[in-house]
Amino acid sequence: MINVFIGKKGSGKTKKLIDYANRAVEKSNGNVVVIEKGLKLTYDISHRARLIDSDAYGIQGLEALEGFLCGICAGNYDVTDILLDSTLKIIGTDMAALSELIAKMAKLSETANVTFTLSISADESELPEDVLAAVTKL
């Protein structure tokens, strides 16, 4: 399953993602992973979630993010949720890359039984139809 928070910058996506992450930690019987760009969520996310700064691991671009997500799932079978803040800042604003990421996340979600939740800084009208069809808007 792939959930998304969609909206322009300043629309409250990150706050919603934080609330969602903290609720996921409370209900999860495994591990919750939150990936952010920069260390801005340290005091907002429950200490029981694994908070990862994408910059610290040099994650930039679609292929790097895909590999990182696969590595997280392969390395820990107890991951139930992976949340990704600032998706387009990590992969770039190419909507074709976003479509590819969503398609690969859908497959990985099924294989690893992980729920992905992303924040996407864009207007819904800017997103490709295949992205909107493959996700659940929160």
Image (tube, grey):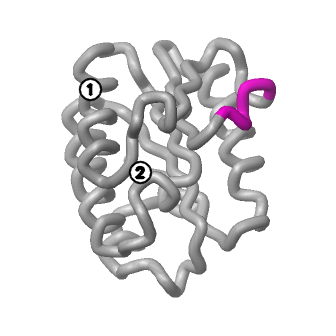
Crowd around label 2: few <14 · some 14–19 · many ≥20 (10 Å):
many
Under circle 2, the secondary element is strand
Count of numbered labels shown in the rendering: 2
- Graded by Cα atoms within 10 Å as few (under 14), some (14 to 19) or many (20 or more), the crowding at tag 1 reads few
Taking the spot 41% from the left edge, 51% from the top edge, the residue there is: 2
Q: Is residue 88 left or right of residue 97?
A: right
- N-terminal label among 2 and 1: 2
Q: Is residue 66 magenta?
A: no
Q: Residue at x 42, y 64 (%)?
A: 92
Q: Amino acid at mark 1?
A: Gly
- Write down the region rendered in magenta: 39-43
The kind of secondary structure element at disc 1 is helix
Q: Residue 100: x percent and y percent?
A: 25, 62
Q: Which residue is mark 2?
A: 2
| Residue bearing mark 1 | 71
Task: Select label 2 or label 1 by which is in front.
Answer: 1
Work out whether 71 lies above or below 59. above
Q: CA distance from mark 2 to mark 1?
A: 18 Å
**Contact flag, marks 2 and 1 (Cβ < 8 Å):** no
Amino acid carrying mark 2 in the image: Ile
Q: Position of residue 107 (x, y in %)?
A: 20, 46
Residue 85 on image: x %, y % = 57, 47
87, above or below 123, in the image:
above
Predominant secondary structure, magenta span: loop
